[in-house]
Amino acid sequence: RRVLFRSRAVLAKAESGNYNQLVFPKRGTNAPTTANLTDMTLNQVLAYQEQMRKSGNYPSDAVGKYQVIGSTLQSAITNLKLDGNQKFDQKTQDKIYEDYLIGGKRKGVMDYITGKSNNLLQAMLEMAQEFASFPVPFDLHRAANVTRSGNVIWDERDVKKGESYYIGSGGNQAHVKLEQSAKALMEERAMRTGSLTAAAYGPYNEIGSKVAASSTQLFAIDRKSTRLNSSHTDISRM
């Protein structure tokens, strides 16, 4: 059974929210900020991303609602056994997010929101490592990422709590607050498991208590339709 991802709603606000969005181009260029991605096949999107890289107009080749880079898209196609001729439409983009980015690639996130792990900080870290708009939950040292040809994708540096894991690369900044990240993951867990225990609060006891207290009311699930049953809760709002 699938339910709406709470983290997806937060991410969509922070990353782009537009299924046809391109990563914002470098300053001084007139490169487009959107393309008709939802009408392209997966193979066509991969080719388009190659053009983006070759143009030099963009800091990366991230595209779509979840700002998926070319190498990640190729991995998703392989791991999910997607047909390269299928459209990169809303349904496909959401599937890649749910079944690969969160459901497969970032095991710490999936383990937390399904109740297999109580490690909230690990889930928050993996969200930050996957999505530049999410903040790291503690200070850390980031190793450099350098291509075989010597191009520096991001440098080696100390990243402070609350910053983007990819700060200093392509103008990336964390647009989600630590409290928002923690709350989104806790609410996602409450929706999926039906409860939230104190063991899963991490250092966010106050937020966890509030989510636990409201989880039954806010996230009652209609098991027949798999849709949320609250007419008073806008899942896209914090």
Image (cartoon, helix red, strand yellow):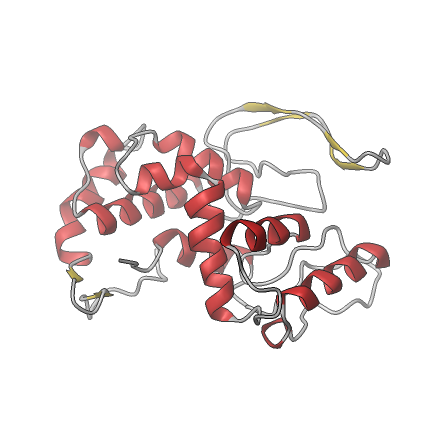
Whether residue 130 is situated above or below residue 137 in the rendered picture? below
The image quarter containing residue 53 is bottom right
Where residue 27 sits: x, y (%)?
Answer: 80, 57
Whether residue 183 is situated above or below residue 6 in the rendered picture? above
- Point 51% across, 39% down: residue: 128
Where residue 162 sits: x, y (%)?
Answer: 50, 35
- Point 51% across, 63% down: residue: 93
Answer whether residue 56 is visible to the viewer in this image: no
Whether residue 25 is situated above or below residue 106 in the rendered picture? below
Q: Nearer the viewer, residue 18 or 93?
A: 93
Q: Is residue 119 left or right of residue 218?
A: right
Q: Nearer the viewer, residue 62 or 179?
A: 62
Q: Quadrant of the C terminus?
A: bottom left
The image quarter containing residue 158 is top right
Where residue 117 sits: x, y (%)?
Answer: 30, 31
- Point 46% across, 40% down: residue: 106
- Point 69% across, 46% down: residue: 171
Q: Is residue 88 left or right of residue 123?
A: right
Answer whether residue 105 is visible to the viewer in this image: yes
Count of labels shown?
0
Q: Quadrant of the N terminus?
A: bottom left
Where residue 194 sits: x, y (%)?
Answer: 17, 48
